[in-house]
Amino acid sequence: MSQHTDPPRPRRSRRELALNAGAVAGVICLVAACASLLFGITPLVFRSGSMSPDIPTGSLALARTADASDLRVGDVVSVDNQAGTRITHRVVSTEPAGDQVVLTLKGDANPAADPVTYTVSEADRVLGSVPLLGYVAAWLSSKTAIFLGGIVAGALLMLAFGPIRRPGGVQPDTEPANPENLASTEAPATQDAAATPAQYQEKTNV
């Protein structure tokens, strides 16, 4: 007696895995773009330890632009100094100056406040930070990461839209008829039908 066994469940194909990976990456990029456009979110990478231990070196922070009048002592803000360098320190004092505010900033790890003040009408206020994630963000923005990302994207496209292969090399149950075989099998019947009357009479007299 033959035993009936259930066929093995097919594994997920490389095409499906590629599409899933591309979809996840697309969703992450879409969420980041929407957050930046709709809510004015700006990512900040801390390359020094001036804000340690609260925000150590290599942290990734998210900041949102706020009016200078809304800034308070204790807020961590990011501004540009006169040389155009981004400074992210904690507010230790504020002083109104017309429509602007004069900020005095200090790094948590620094023994004294910054030697210069910052007159701003708005500043990026830090909402939160994640340690070590800044290293990842900095690497992803490098030329090497962009080059490797292009290779990975190309591989995903090849897997997603490449030719489909039947699992297990399954072959069809029937094969198409060969025209040459059909012609050879019909040849004798054609020859008999084409026999002359004399040959037919000779065959009947035998």
Image: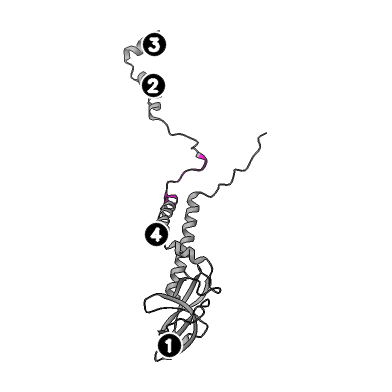
Q: Quadrant of the C terminus?
A: top left
Please name the residue that numbered disc 2 is placed on. 189
Q: Tell me the amino acid under the disc marked 3.
A: Thr
Q: Secondary structure at mark 4?
A: helix
Label 1 sits on residue: 101
Q: Amino acid at mark 1?
A: Val
The disc, 4 or 2, on the residue closer to the chain's N-terminal end is: 4
Q: Position of residue 138 (x, y in %)?
A: 45, 64
Disc 4 crowd, CA 10 A, few/some/many (<14, 14-19, 20+): few
Q: Which of labels 3 and 4 is toward the front?
A: 4
Q: Which mark is residue 204?
A: 3
Q: Are marks 1 and 4 in contact (CB under 8 Å)?
A: no
Mark sitting on residue 44: none
Query: Which label's residue is closer to the chain start, 1 or 4?
Result: 1
Whichever of labels 3 and 1 marks the residue nearer the N terminus, that label is 1
- Mark 3: give few (<14), some (14-19) or many (20+) Cα within 10 Å: few
Residue most toward the top? Answer: 206
Check disc 1: other Cα within 10 Å, few if <14, some if 14-19, many if 20+: many
Q: Nearer the viewer, mark 3 or mark 1?
A: 1
Q: Nearer the viewer, residue 15 or 98?
A: 98
Residue 163 lies within the magenta run: yes
Q: Which residue lies most toward the front here? A: 111
Residue 71: image location, x then y, percent: 48, 85
Give, as a single range, the part of the protein colored magenta: 158-168
User: Which mark sits nearer the N-terminus, 2 or 3?
Assistant: 2
The residue that disc 4 covers is: 143
Question: Gap between marks 3 and 1, in whole Å?
Answer: 125 Å
